[in-house]
């Protein structure tokens, strides 16, 4: 299984290419959604990496993809500027997911 990247900037794309991960740089919502559904048809892609800025543009689509429980697995990554998420985002995510206060 392969990784594939959808990035909003060339720096993240270049870094991933150096690590052997193919991808594209896109900026328009309709292009992004079209590319995601194109990638879903490629059975060799097991993990789809998406930058945080891209994920902010298509939250409904990401939610649908995650709920579908089909490959590829969608993972949101920070871009060259670092993470946009708060420092305790993971704790909040777990609390929302299972309803138990952590830490």
Image: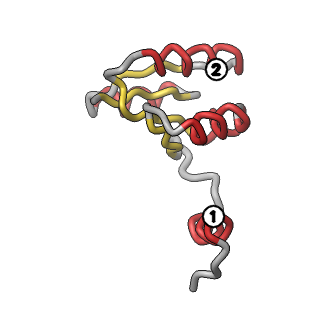
x and y percent of residue 33 in the render?
Answer: 64, 20
Residue position marked by numbered label 2 in the rendering: 33
Is disc 1 placed on a helix, strand or loop? helix
Is residue 82 or residue 41 the one in the foreground? 41
Q: Residues within 10 Å of mark 2 (few under 14, many from 20)?
A: some
Quadrant the C terminus occupies: bottom right
x and y percent of residue 101 in the render?
Answer: 64, 81
Q: Residue at x 27, y 30 (%)?
A: 1
Is residue 79 or residue 74 the one in the foreground? 74
Q: Quadrant of residue 71?
A: top left
Q: Quadrant of residue 30?
A: top right
Q: Earlier in the sequence, mark 2 or mark 1?
A: 2
Residue 36, compared with residue 92, is above or below; it is above
How are the colours assigned in the image? secondary structure
Q: Quadrant of residue 98?
A: bottom right
Q: Residue at x 59, y 71 (%)?
A: 91
Q: CA distance from mark 2 to mark 1?
A: 26 Å
Is residue 65 or residue 15 the one in the foreground? 65
Residue position marked by numbered label 1 in the rendering: 97
Q: How many marks?
A: 2
Task: Mark 2 and mark 1 in contact? Answer it, CB < 8 Å.
Answer: no
Is disc 2 placed on a helix, strand or loop? helix
Left or right of 65 on screen, residue 71: left
Please tell me whether mark 2 or mark 1 is closer to you in this view: 1
Q: Residues within 10 Å of mark 1 (few under 14, many from 20)?
A: few
On residue 55, the disc is none
Left or right of 9 on screen, residue 59: right
x and y percent of residue 16 in the render?
Answer: 36, 32
Q: Residue at x 36, y 32 (%)?
A: 46
């Amino acid at each position: 299984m392969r990784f594939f990247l959808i990035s909003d900037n060339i720096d993240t794309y270049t870094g991933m290419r150096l690590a052997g991960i193919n991808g594209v740089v896109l900026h328009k919502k309709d292009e992004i959604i079209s590319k995601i559904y194109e990638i879903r048809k490629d059975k060799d892609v097991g993990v789809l990496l998406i930058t945080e800025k891209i994920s902010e543009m298509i939250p409904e689509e990401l939610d649908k993809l995650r709920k579908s429980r089909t490959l590829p697995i969608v993972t949101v990554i920070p871009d060259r500027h670092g993470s946009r998420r708060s420092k305790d985002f993971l704790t909040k995510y777990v609390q929302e997911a299972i309803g138990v206060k952590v830490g």
